[in-house]
């Protein structure tokens, strides 16, 4: 009913040559992953044309990690959704917590990015998640609802049907601290419930919601076993093809 997805966010790692090698390794090993799992890698922008060319016939799709919030023009250093799409990339990560924190990306910008990405044929992977103090003070439901309602609830139903959501608790990203399967399920079910309230049950049931935050081969099975977890957005472990593919093999049979 909804897609199982494992997406790898390489962040600012690898040279183009190293990235191409990693992409080829992922591609070679992809044959051993279940065919109903969509595999996506998100290399740095400089590597993307090289990698989309190498993987032109592959089942592994290529995503950007970010795109500009404007269509074109005087935005020095930015790369537009149209440019990304023209490389053969199919997805773009929007609203990663590192972009929200280090580049001051706000919900208004994220909505622009999503709209422009979709106008250019890219599928957005929209990230949301709470900080440690927001979890400890039990504000996490409100925080996530606000992130989702200020961006995704501004889309129409057709647009929303094209969104992948990634729940990434910030306290679990790159820290080695994973959300427990129960913590992940609680939020994934909550996200599905608010999406259902806004857009209807059918759309909510067909929206893939990925977990991200120190997801590794040794914990992915437990997390992916939860009913509302449809896969993972993987950081560190996506830099090793074996680990990335092992995670893709972690769905219940
Ligand atoms: C991420 O940054 O999207 C992420 C999930 O990172 P890590 O797996 O390294 O925690």
Image: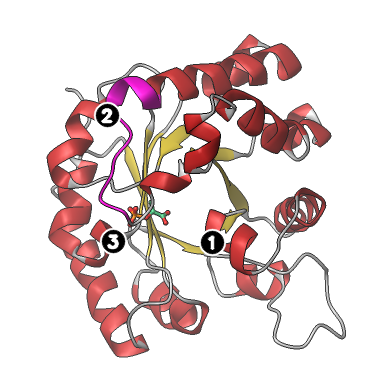
Confirm or deny contact between disc 3 and disc 1 (CB under 8 A): no
Which mark is first along the chain, 1 or 2? 1
Q: Quadrant of residue 37?
A: top left
Query: Which residues make up the magenta segment?
Result: 175-184
Residue under label 3: 236
Q: CA distance from mark 2 to mark 3?
A: 17 Å
From this view, report whether residue 240 is shown above or below residue 209: below
Mark 1 CB in 8 Å range of ligand 1?
Answer: yes
Mark 2 CB in 8 Å range of ligand 1?
Answer: no
Residue under label 2: 223
- Residue placed most toward the observer, 239 or 35: 239
Q: Which quarter of the figure is the C terminus placed in?
A: top left
Which mark is first along the chain, 3 or 2? 2
Q: Position of residue 16 (x, y in %)?
A: 36, 87
Mark 3 CB in 8 Å range of ligand 1?
Answer: yes
Q: Position of residue 77 (x, y in %)?
A: 70, 86
Magenta stretch holds residue 145: no
Chosen colour scheme: secondary structure
């Amino acid at each position: 009913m909804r897609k199982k997805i494992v997406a790898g966010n390489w962040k600012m790692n690898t040279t183009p040559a190293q990235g191409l090698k990693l992409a080829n390794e992922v591609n070679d090993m992809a044959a051993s992953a279940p065919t109903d799992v969509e595999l996506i890698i998100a290399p740095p922008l400089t590597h993307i044309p090289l990698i989309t060319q190498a993987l032109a016939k592959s089942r592994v799709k290529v995503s950007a990690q970010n795109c500009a919030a404007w269509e074109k023009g005087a935005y020095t250093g930015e790369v537009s959704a149209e440019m990304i799409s023209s490389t053969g990339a199919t997805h773009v990560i929007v609203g990663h917590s590192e972009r929200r924190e280090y580049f001051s990306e706000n919900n208004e910008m994220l909505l622009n990015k999503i709209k422009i990405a979709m106008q250019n044929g890219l599928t957005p992977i929209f990230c949301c998640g709470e900080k440690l103090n927001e979890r400890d003070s039990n504000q996490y439901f409100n925080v996530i609802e606000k992130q989702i309602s200020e961006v995704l609830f501004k889309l129409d139903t057709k647009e929303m049907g094209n969104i992948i959501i990634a729940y990434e608790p910030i306290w679990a990203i790159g820290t080695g601290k994973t959300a427990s399967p129960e913590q992940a399920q609680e939020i994934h079910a909550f996200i599905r419930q608010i999406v259902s309230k806004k857009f209807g049950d059918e759309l909510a049931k067909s929206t893939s919601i990925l977990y991200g935050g120190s997801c590794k081969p040794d914990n992915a099975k437990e997390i992916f076993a939860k009913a509302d977890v449809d896969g993972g957005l993987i950081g560190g472990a996506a830099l090793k093809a074996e680990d990335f593919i092992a995670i893709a093999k972690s769905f219940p049979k």
